[in-house]
Image (tube, rainbow, N blue to C red):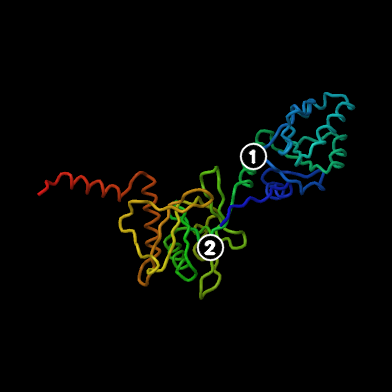
Amino acid sequence: MAMKHDAVTVERFYTDQSSALGLKLIAGAGGLKRVIHEPTINRPGLVLTGFTRYFAHKRIQVIGNAEAFYLKSLPEPQRLLRYREFLRHRLPCIVFSRGLRPDKIFLPIAEAANVPIFQCPLITMKFINLATLALEMMFAPRSTEMGSMVDILGVGVLIRGESGIGKSESVLALLERGYSLVSDDVTRVTLVDGRHIIGTSPELTREHMEVRGLGIIHVAAMFGIRSVRLDKRLDLVVTLKPWEAVPDVDRVGMEQKTVEILGVDIPHFIIPVRPGRDLARLIEVAALHTKLKASGRNPAKEMNDRLLAQMAGTPRL
């Protein structure tokens, strides 16, 4: 599916991160719909001194001890001037770290400008680090993949295939073997650091599975809390296809097929399906094979090298 990027508003940032960051809204609630344009934090020290030629005003602004004590050192008329100049820009929001209380003449100006003002108990650098990590995740490209995802010995496997081909039965068999469910039928994927794909489940269906003929089951309640996990890096995609739809079955595996998800190539296996095949066992072996190759072992190449060496040492007739 197409990559998408949802707008990150101050309201969404506050809702998602208020607990982790200890954010408290103290003014400017009318500006919560403002958009945060950049996934990083800015300390506006230079702007508060009067230098406004370069100002990263599209970022969340944080005021710590250095900025607060500098402003306190100014006469009130000058502080008022600096506040108005600061808030003249369309800022997403302002966070006062270390539990600092804004100047009494600052809040009415911020309220009039509809700039959300937050208070945070964290020290400035800790807030910047945690907020930046949170924003990077919120800004990360994301998409939705149709398929179930499981964690097999640390290998995140997305199982795809047409309806009724046996995805749910395969996942159930893997759960019985002690592996973990990440998502059922629909997997949300996020690109992290431009290299890794993280898969997770929609909130509504988390820890649940739909099994044809049985209905909805609660996986954690049936198989134990170890049978589910919140998210997992995607390492492998397995597509189940009817036997007759795969005329050319790879018998050696010299060339690793891949599928592109959010611009990242993920190893891909196509497993032909017909009655009698143990799909769960085949998916498990595919995951173990991927883990082995990641450690530097390539059985197909090793076999090919042995064959070439044997042929080179055999005298020709």
Q: Quadrant of residue 174?
A: bottom left
Q: Residue at x 77, y 26 (%)?
A: 51
Please, which residue is most extreme toward the right here? 77
Q: Where's residue 143, x and y in %?
A: 58, 54
Of marks 1 and 2, which one's residue comes earlier in the chain?
1
Q: Where's residue 200, x and y in %?
A: 56, 55
Q: Residue at x 76, y 46 (%)?
A: 34
Label 2 secondary element: loop
Residue identified by numbered label 2: 184
Q: Is residue 111 above or below residue 241?
A: above
Q: Where's residue 10, x and y in %?
A: 73, 46
Q: Quadrant of the N terminus?
A: bottom right
Number of numbered discs present?
A: 2
Residue identified by numbered label 1: 132
In this picture, residue 76 sits left or right of residue 62: right
Q: Where's residue 281, x and y in %?
A: 37, 62
Q: Is residue 118 above or below residue 189?
A: above
Q: As shown in the figure, which amino acid type bears the numbered disc 1? A: Thr
- 63 or 59: nearer the viewer: 59
